[in-house]
Structures are given as structure tokens and as C-alpha cells.
Image: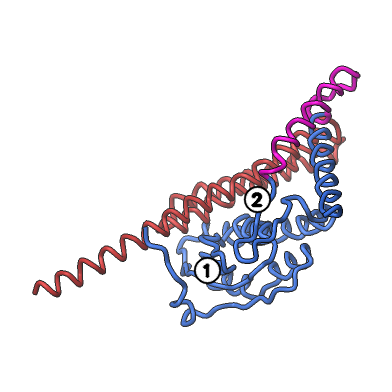
Amino acid sequence: MRNKYQQIQAHFFELSLGLFAVWVLLSGQFEGKFLLIGLCSSLAIAYICYPLLNITNERTGKVYFVFGFNFLKLFVYFLWLVKEIVKASVEVACLVFRPRMDYEPRMAYFSMPFENPMASVILAFSIILTPGTITVDVNDDGIFEVHALTKGMAEGLMEGTMQRKVAALFGETCEFTPMPEAETTHIPKEVC
Amino acid sequence: MEIRNILTILFISAGFLCFAASTIGVFRMKDFYCRSHAAGICGSAGLIFSGLGLFIYEGVNITGIKILLVMLAVCLSSPIGTHIICKVAYKQALAAEAECACNRVEKKEEN
């Protein structure tokens, strides 16, 4: 119990420190009055927003803090992601400028049941940021439905490099399993 | 100073090429999802290139770091929009398909 309380304190401190850093960056003034106002407002914002920044896993009911990951690792991952974005956007741009565009859009499915919901958010974000692939839906069971522009892009995603990197970022041990077309018929589709 | 200007010109030209590709792609692609793929280029690569160009031109000071923050904000917000639009389109298309299937079955039964 006490350990949990300490953890909450540490998260609260991190959050207000981050907000204060953004305040100092954006104001650019280092007088005592402004710093004091910034400190007060960042503490107040952290106090109001902290309950909103805890998300629960729907399957296990565990609560996770949104920013509870290693930012240095995230930065390294982001650099790798920028490289991938540049490669993929050159590919899509070449496709667009070609006189006869030959592409076969398709849906690709894979299962990646992360424990931490933030991990699936980051994976979905990076799939959408890479041109040529869009995450259409993520189930509670961790099944990703991805729309890919060409066959090569779908196959590149199905190699699972990005998924493993995100799993390493969060220290998760879940299995990446690509799902062929035949197996996807049992996925319950909500029809509104 | 010279090298910095040349780098800026290179990066911003690359950003412009990305924006041009995405605009042309939005007009040329055949259906909704493919068009959103094309629109995704300007949200990620175009923004990264032109933002980096502006950052190099400005140097490491408060304005430059603000440019990086703007890049971060757009990188965080543009995928959400793409995802929600595609999700709604997908669900609506599924609903429409299901309705069509129901209508077909009803028509067959009537016949």
C-alpha cells in the first residue's frame, strides 16, 4: 500500500516537472514572479489531470500511468521510426508520381495482446504515422486491423519488427502472431 | 552559415515535395482509404522535413525548440484524426454491407 502511494507521488512529481519545463520553454522568462506562477499552475494542472492519466486494462483490470515508460528509450525508438517514415513516404510518393498507379489495397490482421494499453496506443500511432499503413481498429483482445496500400507494405508490417521494438520499449513479453485471411472470420464485428 | 542555409533549402524542398506528393495523391487515388494514405504523407514526412529545415535555420534557441514542440504536437494529433475518420468509415461500410446482405436475403425470401 505504501509502495503504491510512493509511486503515485513520484508520478505526480514527474508530471508537474514536465509541465513546468514546458512553461519555462514557452515563456522564455526567468524572473522569480513568472517562475512562481508557472510552478503554482503546473502543480494545479497536475493535481486536476492526474486521475485522468491513469488507464485500466480492460482484460486484467490493472491500472497503468500513461507516461510510465522510459523516455530515453522512446526517443531512440522515435529516431528509428523517423527513418521508417522517410523510407515509406518515398515509396508512396514514387507510387503517386507514376503515370500508371498499380497498387492493391488490402486489410491485414495481427494479434499483439499488450498488458499496458499505452503500448497498443504507441504501436497504433506508429503504424498510422508510417505512410501506407493505417490502423483501422484495435480490439480489447489486442487484435489490430490494418489497412495497407500495397502488398509489400502489408508484408513489411507482418515481419513484426515494429511490434517487437514497441514490446521491448515497454518490457512486455507478449507474442506477435500474424493472422492470415482465413483465420479472421471469427473476429466479432460490431455493426452499428 | 553557408552550410546551414544549404541544409535549410534542402530540407524545406524535401518537405515541399512531400506536400506536393500528398496533394496529388489525394486527387489521384481511387477510394477513401487510399486517399487517406496519401494525406498521411503530409502529416508525417512533410511536417518532419519542413520542421527540421526551420529548426536548422533557427538554431538551438527558444524559437527553435518551440518549432520542435509544434512538430511533436502535430505528430501526436494528426494520427488520431486519421484513425477516427477511417474507423468510422469502416464501421459505416460494414453496417451498409450488412444492411445490403439483409435486404438481399429479404428479397430472395419474397421471391
* x, y percent for residue B71: 70, 41
Callout 2 amino acid: Ala
Q: Residue furthest bottom?
A: A182
Please tell me which residue lies in front, A158 or A82. A158
Q: Which residues are magenta?
A: A24-52
* x, y percent for residue B14: 67, 47
* x, y percent for residue A4: 82, 53
Above or below, comparing residue A109 to residue A191 in the picture: below
Q: What hue represents chain B?
A: red
* x, y percent for residue B85: 47, 50
Q: Chain of mark 1?
A: A
Give the residue displayed 62% in from the left and 78% down from the top: A177
Prevailing SS of the magenta stretch: helix
Please tell me which residue lies in front, B44 or A28. A28
User: Crowding at label 2, few (<14), some or many (≥20) Cα neighbours within 10 Å?
Assistant: many
Q: Which chain is blue?
A: A
Q: Chain of mark 2?
A: B
A191 displayed left or right of A34: left
Q: How is the image coloured?
A: by chain
Q: Which mark is residue A133?
A: none
Occupied quadrant, residue A15:
top right
Please tell me which residue lies in front, B102 or B62. B102
The quadrant of the image that shows the N terminus of chain A is bottom right
Answer yes or no: do the residues labelled 2 and 1 have beta carbons within 8 Å? no
Secondary element at tag 2:
helix
Residue ID for mark 1: A150
Give the residue displayed 41% in from the left and 59% down from the top: B91
A177 displayed left or right of B83: right
Residue ID for mark 2: B45
